[in-house]
Amino acid sequence: MSRIHLALATAMLIAPATAHAAELRIATASEATSVDPHFHNAGPNNTLRKHIFEALVRQDAAQMLEPELAASWSAIDDTTWEFKLREGVTFSNGMDFTAKDVIYSFCRIPTVENSPSSFTPFVRGIVSIETPDDHTLVIKTESAQPLLASSLSAVGILSAELNGGLDVAYDPAGCTGLGTPPQSTDFNSTDIAVGTGPYQLVDFIRGQHVILSRNESYWGDAPAWERVTLRPVANQGARVAGLLAGDVDMIEAPPIQDFDNIRNAGARIVQGVSNRVIYLHMDQHEEAGWTTPGVTGTDGKNPFLDRRVREAVSKAINREAIVDRVMGNVAVAAGELLPYPLFGTSEEMKPTEFDPEGAKALLAEAGYPDGFNLVLGTPNDRYMNDERVAQAIAQMFARIGIRTDIDAMTASTFFSRRNNFDFTVYLAGWGADTGEMANPLAALVGTRDTDRGLGSTNLGRYTNPALDDLIIEARSTVDDATREELLRKASRMAMEDFAILPLHFDASLWALRSDLDYEARADQHTLAFEVKPAN
């Protein structure tokens, strides 16, 4: 499978600031909503999870699979996988890691209440799990799941013994012996937030910090830092100021306009291309009595049900100008939901051509010669320059007659409102956990259907049965060449229907002290245990 090449750009090195060898302090651009590894499939949560709770399989910086709690795995046939687990691994509280912990964790996932984005799709399709011994799993799936190992790289493993689940038996209709699983709020306690990872939880206070300490019983290489403090600092300028003042050692997503200041102060910039697409979702829901929020001047109709309107707004967006003028060329204009050459992408899938006159003609053809009024929802602290990108798009929309106001807010408020369908059009981002096209297609444009594992984040409620069938077929096709062609076909179908509007692919960016090293990751995760003192 082709994987994206990550470039590492470093600045000049000068004398380092005072070293804090025992502690690493990181200012993050956003924060996890919970320590619970099964609560929210979101970048900040998944990043925190990897410090404390490991998965069977992990991904390296370029999203290639590597052993983690599973020492090896293999497909016995199309619907049977065998995972050999590491022996001698313990949780940070001293309890042994066995196959029971994996079964317990898979069983617990569907029980998590109020999950904004569930992990259930990662274990969907598993029909049985056998344990010939304490360190072997034989997993049977309903149909062929060639991406099972990749999917399981997203699932953190909990202790069955700690949570009273040693008698658990797997059943997709409802596991037995699960006991009373902990609630997400329980994971604020260091007695419950127990994993096998390189760090253990010391303290978690939303809006203030996460403090971690080195797990001295960790089975793998010991991380360089005895203590890690993660501080959420949404304001870009405040993150940079903290780095330059020596208050923190590393920051996420430094603003492009501060690159020179950072380098001149003796710090360094690390960057690479990410798997995160920034996109616009458009409400395409049709239901008696449904009022499309934030849209006026259409006689009560939802204009985005018309493909011509969706194409018009895509043609109105000058993606190259956004990359150049707003993103400072630290981004790549997007023509589909993953950057080429990741698996399932096509080199010929180019961004929609900027054509405002063509956009006006399409609006007129659709019955909106004078345009209409729109409110565009966006976070203002989640993605690089998110509010500025939304403002640029609003100006571009205005040129074709779509008079657009921006409703910008903090990420926590935005995602809550988005999940309540408060926006007809909104800006957001998606990073593909698996690094292949089935992931964003299934999540973002598959018809919302929990039974089929589709549409978990399709808040535009786009639906296309033919596209759904292609995604499902691709996810059950073992042959790589055939599966990739199915994904390419599905991607072309979604893009030609303007089901969703990809804007650009974010860069992965960090700034850090000159005496530290970090390899840029396509998933944009900031992993303290991968930060090393420079040689």
Image (cartoon, rainbow, N blue to C red):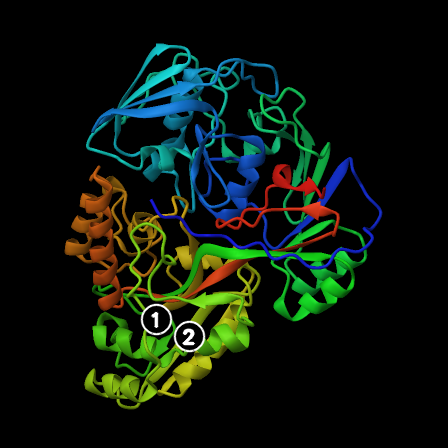
**Which residue is situated farthest in the top direction here?**
133
Image quadrant holding the N terminus, namely top left
Within 10 angstroms of label 1, few (less than 14), some, or many (20 or more) residues?
many
Q: How many marks?
A: 2
Residue at x-position 38% and y-position 21%: 103
Image quadrant holding the C terminus, namely top right
Give how far across and how far down residue 288 sits, in percent: 20, 64
Q: Quadrant of residue 131?
A: top left
Up the image or down, 354 lies above or below 135; here it is below
Up the image or down, 508 lies above or below 53; here it is below
Residue at x-position 27% and y-position 68%: 498
Within 10 angstroms of label 2, few (less than 14), some, or many (20 or more) residues?
many
- In contact (CB < 8 Å): disc 2 and disc 1: yes
Q: Residue 318: which disc?
A: none
Residue on which the image places disc 1:
351
Q: Amino acid at mark 2?
A: Arg
Up the image or down, 234 lies above or below 165; here it is below
- Residue 155 falls left or right of residue 127: right
Q: Quadrant of residue 195?
A: top right
Decide which of 110, 70 is in the foreground and name it.
Answer: 70
Is residue 35 among what the camera can see?
no
Q: Earlier in the sequence, mark 2 or mark 1?
A: 2
Residue on which the image places disc 2:
319
Give how far across and how far down residue 416 sits, in percent: 46, 55
**Which residue is situated farthest in the right direction here?**
18
Q: Amino acid at mark 1?
A: Pro
As measured in the structure, the alpha-carbon distance from the residue carrying label 2 to the one carrying label 1 is 8 Å
- Residue 343 falls left or right of residue 62: left
